[in-house]
């Protein structure tokens, strides 16, 4: 097993220093969630579980915020009625 490198040996990496609101992080994602609003029960599980806060609840509907979605698919996987599809986009 190789030894771990010390911090002086690790190459310099990038750090996102802006807030996500300024840094739209969803443009590189190959898949985007699409909600079938006719089947959505408004349980808000996708809104709660999205690690990027890329689901928006306006009091009436849950909507996808594609500008910030990283396409992980957690929302689609966890939706109890399976009304979120991951589509290329
Ligand atoms: S795919 Fe991932 S990042 Fe995008 S809305 Fe769903 S849970 Fe959030
Ligand atoms: S998890 Fe599914 S049913 Fe629940 S609010 Fe999200 S899209 Fe609607």
Image: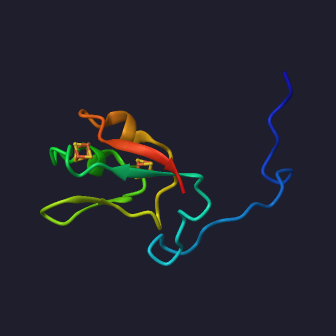
Colouring method of the image: rainbow
- For the point 47% across and 67% down, the residue is 67
- For the point 53% across and 62% down, the residue is 26
Does residue 67 appear left or right of residue 35 in this picture?
Answer: right
Residue 37, percent from left and from top: 23, 52
Query: Is the residue 21 above or below the residue 78 in the image?
Result: below
Residue 23, percent from left and from top: 53, 74
When asked about the image quadrant of residue 21, the answer is bottom left
Residue 36, percent from left and from top: 28, 48
- For the point 86% across and 27% down, the residue is 2
**In this orientation, which residue lies closer to the viewer: 68 or 38?**
38
Can you see residue 82? yes
- For the point 60% across and 68% down, the residue is 16
**In this orientation, which residue lies closer to the viewer: 30 or 70?**
30
Q: Quadrant of the C terminus?
A: bottom right
Can you see residue 75? no
Query: Is the residue 38 above or below the residue 81 in the image?
Result: below
**In this orientation, which residue lies closer to the viewer: 6 or 43?**
43
Query: Is the residue 16 above or below the residue 45 in the image?
Result: below
The residue most toward the top is 1
Q: Quadrant of the N terminus?
A: top right
């Amino acid at each position: 097993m190789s030894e771990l490198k010390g911090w002086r040996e690790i190459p310099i990496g990038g750090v996102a220093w802006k807030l996500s609101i300024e840094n739209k992080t969803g443009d590189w994602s190959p898949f985007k969630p699409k909600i079938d609003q006719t089947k959505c029960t408004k349980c808000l599980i996708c809104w709660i579980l999205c690690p990027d806060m890329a689901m928006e609840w306006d009091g009436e509907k849950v909507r996808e915020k594609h500008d910030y979605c990283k396409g992980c698919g957690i929302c689609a996987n966890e939706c109890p009625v399976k009304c979120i599809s991951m589509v290329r986009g």
